[in-house]
Amino acid sequence: MQKFMTLTEAKSLPFWRRPVALLVLLAAALPFAHSTWMALLNNFTIEVAGFDGSDIGWLQSVREVPGLMAVGVIGLLIFIREQRLGILMVILSGLATAIVAWFPSFEGLLVTTMLSSLGFHYYETVNQSLQLQWIEKDKAPKTIGWIIAAGSASSLVVYALLVVFWQTMGLSFNFVYITGGMTAVILAAVGYFAYPQFNSHTKQHTKLILRKRYWLYYALQFMSGARRQIFIVFAAFMMVERFGFAVHEVTALFLINFAANMIFAPLMGGFVQRFGERRALLFEYAGLMLVFLAYGGIYMFGWGAILAAALYIIDHLFFALAFALKTYFQKIADPADIAPTAAVAFSINHIAAVVLPAALGYLWLVSPLAVFVAAVLMSAISFGLSLMIPRHPEPGRETVFSKAPG
């Protein structure tokens, strides 16, 4: 039976067995499944399953359904602890990834994608909650930056191996999917058996929580989900469809992205810690507007693949600043609200994410330029909302319109 420990008692453990170390391990485990799935997705769907823009849009919409259902985590927490649930979800995602190539049809990909995505999104919901419970507020931005860097390092390993060995060893889709998925399962199993169960300082609510004072956080989460889909779904798809990128070339882009994230994520954590969430998010959204405008220019003026690839890397770096939303919520939240609100926020984040990929997939067939114009408008709305974040958010001062506490 696993031992139960408070966060205070856990400080006496060796560093590698402390709560933050477990967060790092799980952050490193999931990308072996998820990054493998992402790296091969566009080539597998086009070369093996024969997808077009509409098909990929529907697949990505289905992939986001578990995110919309993230509120289900609240019900599961009545029966299972967050820590165990997070680990089991990594295992589910790994197993689903391992069998992707066995079902190379539209229907088969919908099923394996749904299972993999359920594990991914429920893990991310729990992970966000545990980060905000286990990491002290004054250390959160830098620590979360390092956790992101750990995930990027795993993705870097996946992509580096694909770049080096995909062509030279003639790897198959099936071999890579199985290897990536089962690596995630093994690492998650280590997390299950090698760590005690950590008790947070505050017992979490296990009911649906919606608070009026969190409205700005909810709005930013909604816009984040809408805007993110255009990057995830269509930016990489454009590389394959328009410029004919092969597996190792798409993977090389991912490789550069995550190498940059390893370096910049901790620095971005320091940026957020020094300048605050408001400035960090304003910088992110202003940059994204420029990037999406440039994507549109590729279609209007025929700019080439090199610029598209450079924009993809810059795009990814801007999105890395999104963790400032987490630390903004940590500063304004009632500690007992963290777990249920993480689930609610994840569902809100995915409302648009479920609808947009399929709808924009049809729009893509008519005008890819219109898809990127929509992304510019979404980024502009997010920029406007971020102007409402106070310089020093706290309970009672959630927006610039709130009266100062006391």
Image: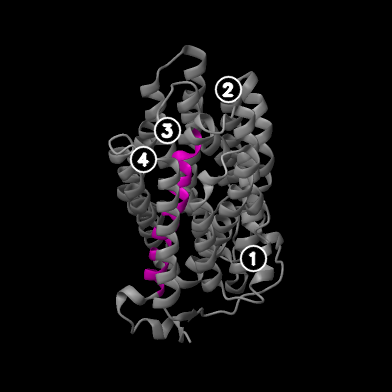
Task: Identify which residue is drawn at 43% across, 23% down.
Answer: 244
Residue drawn at point x = 72 percent, y = 67 percent: 208
Q: Secondary structure at mark 1?
A: helix
Labels 4 and 1: the sequence-earlier one: 1
Foreground label between 4 and 3: 4
Q: Name the residue: 56% across, 46% down.
A: 386
Left or right relative to 187: residue 37 = right
For mark 3, give the secondary structure: helix
Q: Earlier in the sequence, mark 3 or mark 1?
A: 1
Mark 3 or mark 2, earlier in chain:
3
* Residue 279 is at least partly visible in this image: no
Which residue lies under the disc numbered 4? 171
Q: CA distance from mark 4 to mark 3?
A: 26 Å
Q: Mark 4 or mark 1: which is in front?
A: 4
Residue receiving disc 1: 73
Coordinates of residue 212 in the picture (x, y in percent): 71, 60
Amino acid carrying label 1: it is Val
Question: What residue is pinned by disc 2?
Answer: 368
Residue at the spot of label 3: 312
Q: Magenta: predominant secondary structure element?
A: helix
The first of marks 1 and 2 along the sequence is 1
Q: Residue furthest top?
A: 301
Q: Position of residue 376 (x, y in %)?
A: 56, 30
Colour option used: one colour
How far is mark 1 from mark 2, CA to CA?
36 Å
Name the quarter where the C terminus is drawn.
bottom right
Vertical comparison of 109 with 248: above or below: below
Disc 4 element: loop
Magenta residues span 19-42
